[in-house]
Image (cartoon, rainbow, N blue to C red):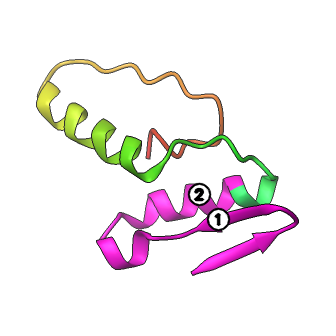
Amino acid sequence: MTIVKGDYFMINEYTDRGIPDIVRQRKEAAFNEGFEQSCKDEAGRLLSVMAAQAGQGRILEIGTGLGVGSA
């Protein structure tokens, strides 16, 4: 699904790749707010792998937007 808003394009590849609904929801929220600086899909996958490797440890993710990377 591609959503067009002015010159900004949001390509949603999540439904085809089994990405959690919360990530899709955060990307939609960012789009609706006009926020264009959310992390890329690849970066989100990397963050997911890194978080899984931490096990019981602590992780700090300092975001700048609407929670796409944290989702």
- Secondary element at tag 1: strand
Q: Which residue is mark 1?
A: 10
Residue 24 is one of the magenta-drawn residues:
yes
How many numbered callouts?
A: 2
- Secondary element at tag 2: helix
In this rendering, the answer to whether 39 lies above or below 14 is above
Residue at the image point whose x is 41% and y is 77% from the top: 15
Q: Which residue is mark 2?
A: 27
Image coordinates for residue 63, horizontal then vertical, percent: 56, 28
Residue 7 is one of the magenta-drawn residues:
yes
Identify residue type, mark 2: Lys
Is residue 23 left or right of 53 when viewed as pictured?
right
For this orientation, the residue located farthest to the front is: 7
Residue at the image point whose x is 51% and y is 21% from the top: 62
Residue at the image point whose x is 30% and y is 71% from the top: 18
Identify residue type, mark 1: Met
| In front of the other: 61 or 17 | 17
Image coordinates for residue 48, horizontal then vertical, percent: 28, 42
Residue at the image point whose x is 36% and y is 64% from the top: 20
What is the magenta range? 1-30
For this orientation, the residue located farthest to the right is: 6
Q: Earlier in the sequence, mark 1 or mark 2?
A: 1
Image coordinates for residue 50, horizontal then vertical, percent: 22, 32
Where is residue 25, by image quadrant? bottom right
Where is residue 3, by image quadrant? bottom right
- Crowding near the residue tagged with mark 1, few <14, some 14–19, many ≥20 C-alpha atoms within 10 Å: some
* Foreground tag (1 vs 2): 1
Q: Are marks 1 and 2 in contact (CB under 8 Å)?
A: yes
Q: CA distance from mark 1 to mark 2?
A: 9 Å
In this rendering, the answer to whether 61 lies above or below 45 is above
